[in-house]
Image (cartoon, rainbow, N blue to C red):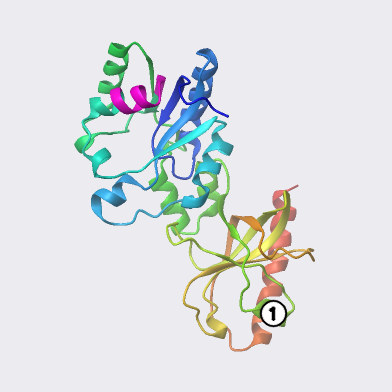
Amino acid sequence: MIEKDAKRAIALGYFDGVHCGHQELMKLAVQRAQENDAISSVFTFDVHPDTVITGCQVPLITSAACRGDEIRERGGVDEVIFAHFNDELRNMEWRKFIDDVLVGRFHACWVITGHNNRFGHRGQGTPDRLQEECARLGIGCDIVQDVRIDNIVVSSTYIRQQIAAGNMERAQKFLGHPYTVAGVVQHGRRIGRTLGYRTVNIALPQEMQAPPFGVYVSRVIADGEAHSAVTNIGVHPTFGEGAAACIEPHLLDFEGDLYGKFIKVELLHFLRPERRFDDSEELKAAIAADIAQTRAWFAETEK
């Protein structure tokens, strides 16, 4: 159990997707914590600040329910602090945020953030001001420069664009891990089993950046084991569109029962758009082709 009044090395940011840039911040937070006999922490918000400020939902790379676990697993930090982003925090003077929140409430002995991060009222808390205030308070501060891949700055915005376009390999390169959707397996319309291809079904969280509807080479993590899968994302146009999109992986060479279990679905490669077929036989042939392509993809990439 973490002590309430323990010193903390705090990485500051929103951390959507926990991409390669975020991981650099957290790696440094872990290092500073070890050097100062402190706890490594991430300080973030429960909702994206831009969603509150603009009134428009910012689509997320990681679902709200999974962000805490994702940050801890990918970053190796001891704890994640979620602050409720409300009018009080939105309008808080930047120095007060450092003095009263980071240091006063959470006992920061070191603060780490990106060079483009802004905080406090009207974003007046800049990295330069953060460094100056930390120096005045006698605590450490690191400002981390951009991480670039292929001379492109790693950012959640760029990764969302790749996901929206179905460029899953590109998204994975910048994330440092596959784009993943997780959830509890629900009962679906049982269409797959009538076609001879059983699927498991999870909902696509509404707050997430939706990839294009279609069929994906994927990997399903269930009960600690990884399974190759073909995953359809969409609304079943052949059998009449449903009210909401769902994610339906067909696990290859798997016969178990996953109903009610929490699974993760890693989307690795976009195969084809979702389409309406004239009859079930045409759909079955398409699924067989999808499975064959998926097996070939894994055989090629895992050489």
- Residue 155: within the magenta? no
- For label 1, the crowd category at 10 Å Cα-Cα, with few meaning under 14, some 14 to 19 and many 20 or more, is few
Left or right: 110 as drawn, with respect to 276:
left
**Rendered location of residue 123, percent (x, y):** 23, 35
Name above or below for residue 251 compared with residue 123: below
**Rendered location of residue 144, percent (x, y):** 40, 25
Q: Residue at x 47, y 26 (%)?
A: 4
Q: Which residue is mark 1?
A: 285
Q: Residue at x 43, y 29 (%)?
A: 11
Residue 247 image-quadrant placement = bottom right
Left or right: 164 as drawn, with respect to 74:
left
Left or right: 92 as drawn, with respect to 232:
left
Q: Residue at x 62, y 65 (%)?
A: 231
**Rendered location of residue 49, percent (x, y):** 31, 45
Which image quarter holds the N terminus? top right
Q: Amino acid at mark 1?
A: Ala
Name above or below for residue 209 compared with residue 94: below
